[in-house]
Image (spheres, rainbow, N blue to C red):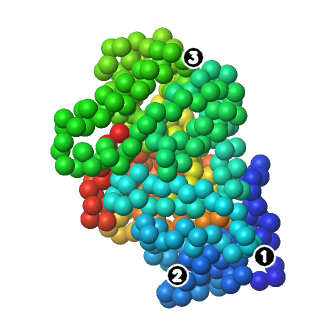
Amino acid sequence: MADVDFSLLDLPRATPPEPDAYLRAAMAWHFGAETGSPYWLRTAEELDFDPLTDIRTFADLRRFPNFVNQLRDVPAEDLIPRGYGSPAPIPMIFESGGTTGAPKRTAQLPDWVAQVAEWQTDDFARAGFVGGRGLLCMMPSGPHGVGHFSRVVSGRLGSICHLIDLDPRWVKKLVARGAAGEMSAYLNHILDQAEWVLRSQDVANLHTTPPLLDAIARNDTLAQLVGDKVRFILLSGAHVDPDSLDVLRDVFPAATIAMVFGSTMILSQAQTRIAGEEFVFDPRSPYVFFWVIDPDTGEQVGYGERGQVVMNHISKGMFIPNNLERDSAIRLPGPDGQVGDSIAEVAPVAVLDGEPVIEGVY
């Protein structure tokens, strides 16, 4: 494949490459014997088609089965493409929250991590982040990417980042077994940590989840502290309906409330734009793109209709195609040149892969 330009895969870059040429380069990279990862070279042998010759369009990616559950136990080293050389760069390992069972794992190479940091810095700034004033990040850290990127982005914007301890997997276990008392105690533990920071530090920015902001709103002390100090609130992780968002805006009128939508399985978050009164999420095409489908037929639903979200990630470091996610959403057309769909009004499905979807606080 002498005509393939692998430089199209290099990151970070200011503008995305032409999608079709990018797809050709990515397929040659991930399924070439000298450049592909041990995982995908091994997996390709199980397919009834040849990715190097049979995947010509983004629609052709639907031929791939959904292999994402294998990311629960595949060795991290097997996810690194050979084309990075030997020794390969050390990836950052980020894991999902375990909403649908054992966590899934991604290996994010330094080039991709650098690109996401640039995107998110721009996203935070455009959304209203108050640079130079502290950020309280009430999000998971540990193996979760959101804590890492919140630290990096706040530093780039001249702000100190204050993190708390938050284990979303433990919360989900409490919810699953109906342990209301323990759940309440753990929630109070999270809120106590937030109060310690808010009382003693210069905090003007808050990154948290809709359930936690709702809990803050119901706590008179914390609601007063956030109302007095915080001027930018970024919501992500769990989902929120438009009516609940309106209530939160009424409780915290002095703060700009923004939303982002991301997933461990796309190794990033979508761009957010406001259309009328709703948040619309545009994927970072051609690296990430969505299809909104009828899960019973596999066909895309009409624009303005609700369906289940299929997520795709294609970068130099990882290839995750045709992943039917836990989210449903309204399908919308994307900006000119975007691959796939944009989405709005994201909400969880009740069951995925036979397992109940439990959000908890994240």
Instruction: From the image, tell me which residue sits under label 2.
Output: 43
Mark closest to the chain's N terminus, 3 or 2: 2
| Res. 254 visible in picture | no
Instruction: From the image, tell me which residue sits under label 3.
Output: 202
Helix or strand or loop: what does disc 2 sit on?
A: helix
Q: Nearer the viewer, mark 2 or mark 1?
A: 2
Q: Amino acid at mark 1?
A: Val
The percent position of residue 18, horizontal first and vertical second, equals: 74, 62
Residue at screen point 41% across, 45% down:
346
Give the alpha-carbon distance from disc 2 to disc 1, as whole Å: 22 Å
Mark closest to the chain's N terminus, 1 or 3: 1
**In the rendered image, which quarter contains the C terminus?**
top left
Q: Amino acid at mark 2?
A: Thr
Instruction: From the image, tell me which residue sits under label 1.
Output: 4
Q: Amino acid at mark 3?
A: Asp
The percent position of residue 260, horizontal first and vertical second, equals: 52, 40
Residue at screen point 30% across, 53% down:
357
The percent position of residue 211, horizontal first and vertical second, equals: 35, 34
Question: Dot 1: few (<14), some (14–19), or many (≥20) neighbours within 10 Å?
Answer: some
Mark closest to the chain's N terminus, 2 or 1: 1
